[in-house]
Image (spheres, coloured by chain):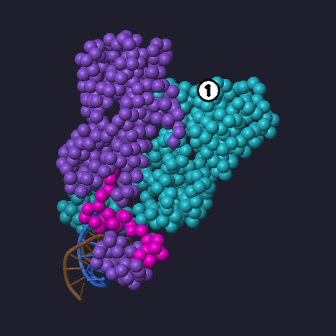
Chain colours: A cyan, B purple, C blue, D brown
Amino acid sequence: MVSINDVAKKAGVAKSTVSKVLNNYSLVSDETRSKVEKAVEELGYVPNSVAVSLSKKVFNRVGLIVDIRHNSQFVDEISMQYLTGAFEKAKEYHIEVVTFFSSQFDEMNYKQVTAYLKSQRINCLIIYNLSIENKNLYKIIEKQEFYCVLVDSPITNDRTSSVSLDHYSAQYEVAKKTLQENSYIDRVLYIAGGAGGYITNRRLDAMKKLQEEFGFELIVKHGDFNEYKAREITLKFGKKSNAIVCASDLMAIGAVFALTEMDIYRPVCGFDGIRLMGYTKIAMNTVKQNFNLKSKQAFDELKKLLDGEKGQHTEIPYEVCTINYMDVIQK
Amino acid sequence: MVSINDVAKKAGVAKSTVSKVLNNYSLVSDETRSKVEKAVEELGYVPNSVAVSLSKKVFNRVGLIVDIRHNSQFVDEISMQYLTGAFEKAKEYHIEVVTFFSSQFDEMNYKQVTAYLKSQRINCLIIYNLSIENKNLYKIIEKQEFYCVLVDSPITNDRTSSVSLDHYSAQYEVAKKTLQENSYIDRVLYIAGGAGGYITNRRLDAMKKLQEEFGFELIVKHGDFNEYKAREITLKFGKKSNAIVCASDLMAIGAVFALTEMDIYRPVCGFDGIRLMGYTKIAMNTVKQNFNLKSKQAFDELKKLLDGEKGQHTEIPYEVCTINYMDVIQK
DNA sequence: TTGTACGCGTTATCAA
DNA sequence: TTGATAACGCGTACAA
């Protein structure tokens, strides 16, 4: 392991001088600079990030908290896009990231979680899909000991930003489009996410607005973003409704497959625009969002927080469309 | 940030004593031990892993190298299971892991990659789906500067173990079963993985064995595990074959959808047993493997390497079956 | 059984 | 403009 001492020795200078060259201090003569750079090059020296982290007062390490525990398997696709987006930005900003799965924190209390994160010298968090059961994370956000960016949870404070799309209007648009494409609608089944969640409530508001406008009866059931539950709900309430609006594509798939089994047709729409949809060959309206981009934007917001800005809420664009197989496999 | 000094002060002992308690040294009186433990508890102290890593001579940090770059999107599912499996074992062994995507190393040369990894104090690697284009990683394995475990690449040396299933017999079995279920087979299209890959060659051998036994004509094309390519190949060669064997489920899906478009039927079989298959509602034979388990086993093998054992090759079980929707969504 | 002192690789301060 | 030295938080011989 080649260290700064080796470089200093080779270049014939003090290690503090090497450090200065590496960190672009201005007060270094061109001559010593080039000597050092030459030695660095020859030895293939790269600073030990562990030691850097230990010695610096501020050293930013970002924890990416991905939620794969609850619900079905196919949030995989979304989580993976979140991760890749964040990794790309991390590289761009030269900031270290560490991946966590929220299930890791399940058996810990608040104190343990913060201690654990701090012990890894993590001072920033990007939290994807914060679920309301996760009291620890809520407390972390509230206490502001970490810089946080929340993806799809509209909480902000001085050290917390949030990135999401406009769930209200997106839900409104996709549902409206789906209902208008079909003739007679007098009873709509809405398979919502988890009871009490921020997003769930926003989207529910949109459905109520639509209900006022169209004057249909609205049946609301909570599928917890779980396709199996959505399936059960559809088997139970699908027949007596004449359209089904789902708060996620996954639940929409569960609903459609249930309808197929029941051998009846009902218009269904989803939310997310996941590629999996293309494989099912189901053509339904959905809200397509770019998860990779959303994650990147979250990282940009984090950078702003680190640069001293206060937390803010930002939104990303979306598109109401259908996902088809050929689009999905092209790339 | 509460440090070992704070604990020592609170407990009224020297920090070295605290360290001994924490690292389970035997030569500590019960009295001081409990004093220290109490202080640790009250302060919520967790050792700073960065400092630990710096001070220890050997500190194991594992880099998980996941390949999401090449081919289609739906390796996502597999990669995610690899990651979760490794994370669980990491927790069990108290070893730190860091996630990398192999695309991160694309523009680097060998020296840069090793320097980068070492700068992060990484001394172990678990490499999933090493592709033959990745010269850097091959060199890393060869040089033995890192302890490596390869998943699905049967290379071993003193510091390198590998975990995979028996690709030869698995390919043989699934293909044989598929062919036997259908009446007359005289020409088989085999859509292989990447040309020259280890796995690809093993599986190809199995197909040749089968060819000898059954006496059919074997057409081999390389789909590079890419469903779009598999689709193109099927469109071109599907009609004149009367069965299609694919080296991955993804390619098999591409083939089936192409056949549907061509409006002809051919028996098709896949490989991997991914859950996505359940969503396509295609019932085809495939080789089902447990990716999560495979990743865990890889971690166990890594542990053995760290404990001084020499690298070895191990295999995991597989099952020839079909993947159906209800099995997939149940859990 | 406990405490002292040093080293790990780096940055930061201050004197030269 | 450079270099010596003290941190950073921890583990660990070695001395007490």
Residue placed at 42% from the left, 43% from the top?
B81
Q: Residues within 10 Å of mark 1 (few under 14, many from 20)?
A: few
> Eyeballing the image, is B34 above or below A106?
below
Quarter of the image that includes the C terminus of chain A: top left
The range drawn in magenta is B36-64
In the rendering, at what x and y percent does residue A36 appear?
24, 59
Viewer-nearest residue: A303 or B130: B130
Q: Position of residue A304 (x, y in %)?
A: 53, 55
At x 72%, y 25%, the residue is: A182
Residue on which the image places disc 1: A260
| Residue sitting at x 49%, y 17% | B260
Q: Residue A240: in sight, yes or no? A: yes
* Depicted A146 relative to depicted B33: above or below: above
The total of numbered circles placed on residues is: 1
Residue A231, by quadrant, is top right
Is A213 in the magenta? Answer: no
